[in-house]
Image (spheres, rainbow, N blue to C red):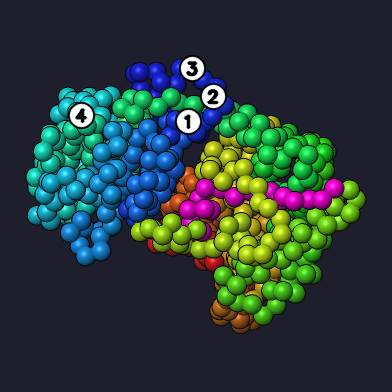
Amino acid sequence: MTNPTTSRGWYAREEFVADIHSEKILVLDFGSQTTQLIARRVREARVYCEIHPCTMPLAEVKAFSPKGVILSGGPASVYAEGAPTLDPGVLQLGVPVLGICYGMQIITHLLGGVVARGERREYGPAKMTVGSTVGPFRELDTAEPHQVWMSHGDRIEKMPAGFTPLAFTGNSPVAAMGDPARRIYGVQFHPEVAHTPEGAAMLAAFVLGECGCRPIWTMHNFVEATVADLQTRLAGKKVICALSGGVDSSVVALLLHRAIGENLTSIFVDNGVLRAGEVSEVAGVFRDAFGVNLRVVDAAGEFLGRLKGVTDPEQKRRIIGHAFIEIFEAEAKRIGQAGGNVDFLAQGTLYPDVIESVSFKGPSAVIKSHHNVGGLPEKMQLKLVEPLRELFKDECREVGRELGLPETIVSRQPFPGPGLAIRIMGEVTKKRLATLREADAIVQEEMRAADLYHKVWQSFAVLVPVKTVGVMGDERTYEDVIALRIVDSVDAMTADWSRVPHELLAKLSSRIINEVQGVNRVVLDISSKPPATIEWE
């Protein structure tokens, strides 16, 4: 995980603190598509933070005890009917507050200022001049303009009493404002996005400088604190771990192996919708390299039987999630019969899974269910252990490196829990799985050969539920279509299609059409997230 650096040298010394949540920032979400990026930037400054809806009751905000609060952007206008708002008490807690875009406007609105529709909307890059080096600007140069990313239609017409302008652009006389006495600040631009090059340093200046947080949220500290917590919570208890071979579940397995040793049994389920060679690869790494107690369960027939005739993607996810749990509960009983009941199931749920799968009952919408979070049966007998539930993907990878996981697993591209089942549009059958598995193997092989596998976020094949006309030799064909999905991302919250070389695309198309029986067309998905998701289902 990268860290913004400043002249203050905030990261010169790594301090271990057992309570890694003692220094924390609260991010209140007003429905922005980039709220998760705010949280990631705070984490990059080595400060723990959580995202909660802007409707979070004041009593809960106080109980959270944040050292600072950040208000996200959002698509609404503060004067629109039903626009999300904030309990004014949050602005009276006495801790620093930073409003971003809509967050700045809601501060203005609640404190007696005036927000009005701008003469023209401001979207995209802008040059901002800083007039006062306070709050998030304490490390910035006032002599040169700074590039920022704007995305707003409203503007600050009149600042609340006590506020002064801190920066301006050609279209925004108040591109930033602040009341240093109350330590409340607002910026009209988005410091969390990559298009604001100094944005990470601005957020670091706010949380480390203005809020006074210590940079103790490191993955070394996380490992030490989490292992100690697991040893206490699970002392004398038997746990099974759902191991898929991906980085998330692999990290969970090693954390628990370090914490409780022989009381952990990792279970790898061959559900029939895995990639080629995954079973032998996972078994080899965890049994041979780490000595983990591992059981491999062949349940391909069970999963494919349940998926027969199913085409709805959410139903696929629920079926697979429920089948996993039933298998884990059955294995837990077998282990219990051998001595000692199994009460806990560990799995690799990450923070983006929680954000995307569980409704915050706020402005941000639930995107999809996830078998780790939203697809579990209500009456599951096993209690869940999810030690990575607070981490973003890049943080999870750092934990893996701390634990000594081989880079082949740490840097492995994300693979969904429902596997190839949600990369097959329509019904999942053995024949269609064989087609996709072979095409996907070619994608993985060629991406590695081109030294691009670790440079993109994900690269995979999708089997499309249509057939198209083609010509092979002198014969007319009517066969399957494979779509290529290759994207760049940091944490899967946003993504853009990768501009890979045309020569590679040509080679992928040629190999798939010539080597995978029943495919006569290959297409490329060039949509970004949002509005599309990375996976097709």
Residue 180: image tag: 4
Q: Given the current orientation, which residue lies at the most extreme right position? A: 338
- Residue closer to the observer: 526 or 474: 526
User: Per the image, is 364 magenta?
Assistant: no
Which image quadrant: the C terminus?
A: bottom right
User: Is any part of residue 450 visible from this angle?
Assistant: no
For badge 4, the amino acid type reads Pro
Q: Which amino acid does label 3 sit on?
A: Arg
Residue type at tag 2: Val
Callout 1: SS: loop
Disc number for residue 17: 2
Residue holding disc 1: 22
Q: Quadrant of residue 408?
A: top right
Crowding near pointer 2: few (<14 within 10 Å), some, many (20+)?
A: some
What is the three-letter code of the residue carrying label 1?
A: Ser
Number of the front mark, 3 or 1:
1
Residue bearing the label numbered 3: 13
- What is the CA distance from the residue labelled 4 to the residue labelled 3? 28 Å
Magenta residue span: 340-357
